[in-house]
Amino acid sequence: MALPARSASAASTLTNGGFESGTTGWSTYGSTGASFTEAGGRSGSLRLAHWSASAYKVETYQYLTGLANGTYTLTAWVRSSGGQNSAYLALKSGSAEQRTDLPPTPNGSWIRLVTSVTVTGNACTIRLYSDANAGNWANFDDIALTPGSTSLPVKGADISSLKKSEDFGGVYRTGSGATADALAVLKSAGMNYARLRVWVDPADGYCDKARVLAVAKRVKARGMKLLVDFHYSDTWTDPGAQTIPSAWSGHSYAQLKTDVHDHTYDVLSALKAQGTTADMVQIGNELNGGMLWPTGSTSNWAQLAGLLTAGATAAKAVSSSTLVALHLANGGDNALYRTWFDNAVSRNVPFDVIGLSFYGYWHGALSDLQANMDDLAARYAKPLYVAETAYPFRLDSDDDWENVIDKAEELVGGYPATEAGQAAWFRDVQSVVEAVPSGRGLGVFWWDATWTAVEGNGWDPTVPSTGNAWENQALFDYDGVPTEAMSAFAHR
């Protein structure tokens, strides 16, 4: 249980947010010896530390009065060992309080977090809290309180596997175990945006235009928004594969531009005609090396730009309000993103949003994601979202196919392969996106939330006998019940 705040001598402005004057201006409650300043500040000489050789509960806080009522945002730079029972920063006014949990930072990097609350009664309390085990530590520095609020408008998931799973007998349940529509379960948890991939002519017929249209009706009927992810292939595209669809094989660059335009226009106009206009569109998927290889490889940026522009132009022709996104993988690699988007911008490729895939077991630390997103937001002045992330809630498999992540050494430090670990990963990725400056962090899509192990719904659309390598990273467990991570959709 959190310690109750104790009123300090009130001030009208935050003082000593960088702890360069020790703990002057701050008050401590609980295990007071576990809250102290030490060398190693993020921007100055000192930082606040929570640590003790024995278990402890401590709160370091400031009580502010004389504030104009309205919304305020608390910003703090933090580091943490992880392993605490609870560790967070919070902003409290009256009975209203908003908290942001501290992510573990085993690499020692600082991460900026935010939280906001509506101040009433002209007063609020800034709280830095740890309920920790012996030896657990947390650092805080560069605390700031500014007018304004934070939120994540996009709380999404890719559900491209859902239709095939259902057709092959997949069953989804509520938390109490009752059979239910997976979309209803996700919606009730707080999901508000669905992502659907579309292939040109897939071997098994799934993720084609017809089935995307069918699932889109269900998405919109639930009051969710729709992101359509064009792969421009008959199968998976990613940094290692961008295979031209068989129907476009042998086409010239000029013809491929027409193919991209017409396919994009066809799918999106059909969605619009049935009353399910796409709210966002990805022109390609994980385009690190380009698309439609070799024609649209990044080794020929002029042609890649032409193909991207053809898709974006088609999307806007169907609906000017549809957001056009360009999406890369390796979300912690700033050099990749700068090089790629500098090329796109210099060739006037039209886009509204930047999408990033970020899997912590492949793409670096959360601090790398934050540094990249901060730079991109400033450099291109565009909103950003994490188009794909996921994490396992267990390591064993629910079918005979080896899972992508199935060994303890593959995990991210501080995040066990448990339902709590999966939930913490989702929460902490959201917290990093929420902290992107100027409100340019839109939100996060979980990939692929509904891909449970169902015979016939495997990786390879050309080989029905392949299994699922992802079921331990879905948001439904091996009984079809929501995992704890689904609660993260309720993020403010």
Image (cartoon, rainbow, N blue to C red):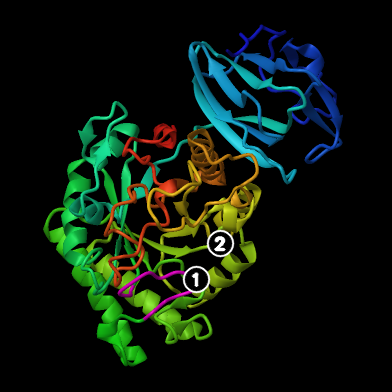
Q: Quadrant of residue 327?
A: bottom left
Answer left or right for 465 relative to 426. left
> Does residue 357 show up?
yes
Mark 2 residue type:
Asn
Q: Residues within 10 Å of mark 2 (few under 14, many from 20)?
A: many
Mark 1 residue type:
Pro
Q: Is residue 233 part of the magenta span, yes or no?
A: yes
The residue stretch that appears in magenta: 232-243
Q: Is residue 140 part of the magenta span, yes or no?
A: no
Residue nearest the viewer, comparing 104 with 464: 464
> Does residue 70 show up?
no
Look at mark 2 in the image and give the residue it sits on: 330
Percent position (x, y) of residue 356? 49, 58
Query: Residue at the location (24% across, 73% down)?
Result: 203
* Position above or below: 429 against 68: below
Q: Find the distance from the CA under tag 2 to the CA under tag 1.
A: 9 Å
The answer to the question of whether label 2 and label 1 lie on touching residues, with beta carbons closer than 8 A, is yes
Percent position (x, y) of residue 143? 69, 30
Q: In which quadrant of the rendered image does the C terminus lie?
A: top left
Which SS does the magenta portion mostly show? loop
Percent position (x, y) of residue 479? 33, 38
Look at mark 1 in the image and give the residue it sits on: 239
Percent position (x, y) of residue 27? 74, 13
